[in-house]
Image (cartoon, rainbow, N blue to C red):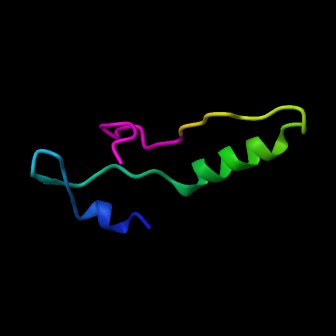
Amino acid sequence: MTERMTKGVLQPNGTTVAEPRMDVQAVANAIVYMDSLPLDANVQFMTVMATKMPFVGRG
């Protein structure tokens, strides 16, 4: 799903820059963690993103 990011994506300033990606295993680990919680606990917010991603939630 993120293969195109390695070739470059149009940025807000008009340039095209390759964006950082992360191993899908990190997402899987987050899901397994949430699944391991008891039913009386929940995770309301969890952001899992590449370390060098320049912006959070830029859509």
Q: Is residue 58 magenta?
A: yes
The image shows residue 10 at horizontal and vertical percentages of: 18, 56
Residue 15, compared with residue 2, is above or below; it is above
- Total numbered circles: 0
Task: Give 1 or 45, whichever is nearer the viewer.
Answer: 45
Q: Does residue 22 appear to the left or right of 54 in the view shown?
A: right
The residue drawn where x is 10% and y is 52% is 15
The image shows residue 17 at horizontal and vertical percentages of: 18, 53
The residue drawn where x is 59% and y is 48% is 26
The residue drawn where x is 60% and y is 36% is 46
Task: Give 19 or 55, whichever is nearer the viewer.
Answer: 55
Task: Give 10 or 19, whichever is nearer the viewer.
Answer: 10
Q: Quadrant of residue 42?
A: top right
**Range of residues picked out in magenta:** 48-59
Residue 7, compared with residue 51, is above or below; it is below
Q: Does residue 34 appear to the left or right of 45 in the view shown?
A: right
Name the outermost residue toward the right.
Answer: 39
The residue drawn where x is 90% and y is 37% is 38
Magenta stretch secondary structure, dominant: loop
Query: Looking at the rendering, in which quadrant would you find the N terminus?
Result: bottom left
Q: Quadrant of residue 57?
A: top left
Q: Does residue 2 appear to the left or right of 45 in the view shown?
A: left
Q: Is residue 45 magenta?
A: no
Q: Does residue 53 appear to the left or right of 31 in the view shown?
A: left
The image shows residue 59 at horizontal and vertical percentages of: 36, 48
